[in-house]
Amino acid sequence: MSSRVVPPSTRFKAVTLREYWEVYESSVGGLEVFWAREAGRLLWRKPWEAVRVGEGPGSRWFVGGELSPYENIVLRHSGTWVWRKPALVWEDEAGEARVVTYAQLDQMISRIAGGLRSLGVQRGDWVVVYSPPSVEAVAAMLAAVRLGAPFEPVFTGFSARELARRLRRRGAKVLVAADGFLRRGRPVRTLEAAREAMASAGTGARLVVVERLGCSLREGELSFDDLLSAGGEPGSAAVPSDHPLFGLHSGYESDFEPITHPAGGFLVQVYATTRWMGLRPRDTYFCTVWPGWITGVAYVVFGPLIVGSAVLLYEGGPDWPSWGRWLELIDSYAVTVFLTTSSALRMMARQDPSLLKGNLDTLKAVLVTAEPLEREVWEWAYTRLANLSIPVVDSAGRGTVPVVNLYIQSEVGTFVTGNLLNYTFPPVAPGSAGPPIPGFHVDVVDGEGRSVRGSPGRLVLRAPWPSMPVE
């Protein structure tokens, strides 16, 4: 196989490396013009007065502008055909499934937002969510967004101590936690960790429990059904562009710091990159990264819903009851875009091929994140996952749809490098995280800050980006 590959399905969209660099250099040579054009695709209640003010970490984008994040994520589809189509498709390890349309999701979010407001949540108050990927978890996050309340999702693999640190740092008003879920055939009980974290944090937050495995609530705790029945019809809060939308934390001990993304800049970035990486309203999209990590927030909770895609949520493990489970889900739900991690593909590549069953003909792209995928694993994914069962006459003889590496950082908020199926698609270089995405002034430098090529260095961004963290 050559050092660079253009799969047959993308040849009509492919650009040469020279053409790609022309697009990229034009974008970074006029960042404000470039991102203002993308910002114009959102719905603004009040137009911005300046595209960008300031330099470096203190820069702010779309200054003076106001928008309703919820209107841009969900309500934008009201009155269109998307409103009646699936927004979320959920399945657990036991095979129980649920489908929620955009209209139904909006109704659910409205009720949850009313419940949160009855608990005293106001604009600017933090809501923390401790749950596997579920309809309730996504709806709770978006209900906070609807009120103008920022949220932080916490990975359920984190201990009570880690959850408590986040509750304390955010001064959380409410914690929404699942009582547990099934993983690899065994119950994972998260309510105990949630209770321990609440006691340790001492923030006075209210605990709302999503009952899945069955539990007895203690005094002062509310069930998710209580939240739904609280009543009220909250509006869709408009906020300044730099208003906190959501947050995560980086590091563990001495470098434990909050990362909080602004509403306007983040939504501009995530809407643009989601479109560019190939998602459309008719797509069914499966991301195996859970909310709690930046990929799971940006490209499960936000991007696909803004675009109008159907999002498949699965809270089980990749290897239960066999390593073919994810492929069975792709087959069952006719998934068109599959996003997973390099480590997951490495593990799958080691398994008995007879276990990896499923018709993957609906796939139009396999997207990979977290770290660069070694060339040999990339070739396995290209020939096994991205190869139609229907013969295709092609000189390459292997692979039909692209397997694309994308790089993301919590601080940036979205993908920052990678081949883009619906924007700039130069030939794929297996083993690489792809070229810089237009709009991000990316460089690699040595210890002295000098640009380097062909040798290891540090990835840096030489200019601000719209979702510069506000803390």
Image (tube, rainbow, N blue to C red):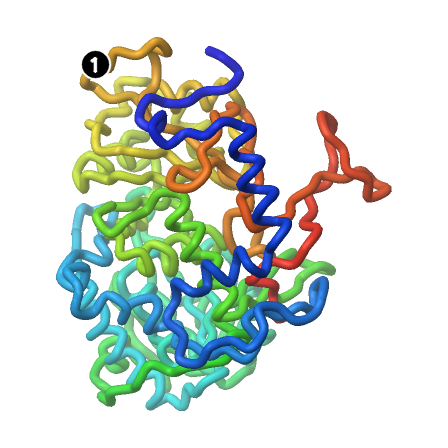
Amino acid bearing label 1: Pro
Residue at x 21% of width, y 33% of height: 362
Q: Given the current orientation, which residue lies at the most extreme right position?
A: 448
Q: Quadrant of residue 106?
A: bottom left
Number of marks present in the image shown? 1
**Whether residue 321 is visible:** yes
With 226 as the anchor, is 401 left or right in this view? right
Does 272 sit above or below residue 358? below
Examine the image and state in which quarter residue 351 appears: top left
Q: Is residue 321 left or right of residue 288?
A: left
Q: Disc 1 designates what residue? A: 391
Depth check: give the residue in front, 362 or 126: 362
Q: Residue at x 65, y 59 (%)?
A: 464
- Whether residue 200 is visible to the viewer of this picture, yes or no, is no
Q: Is residue 185 above or below residue 139?
A: above
Near-viewer residue (247 or 177): 247
Q: Position of residue 393 (x, y in %)?
A: 25, 11
Q: Quadrant of the C terminus?
A: bottom right
Q: Secondary structure at mark 1?
A: loop
Badge 1: how crowded within 10 Å, few (<14), some, or many (20+)? few
- Give x and y (percent) for residue 429: 52, 24
Q: What residue is at 21 percent from the left and 14 percent from the top?
A: 391
* Residue at image location 55% in from the left, 82% down from the top: 202
Q: Position of residue 7 (x, y in %)?
A: 37, 23
Q: In the rendering, at what x and y percent does residue 354 appear?
A: 26, 18
Does 378 appear above or below 90? above
In this rendered view, identify the residue nearer to me: 324 or 161: 324
In the foreground, 136 or 285 = 285
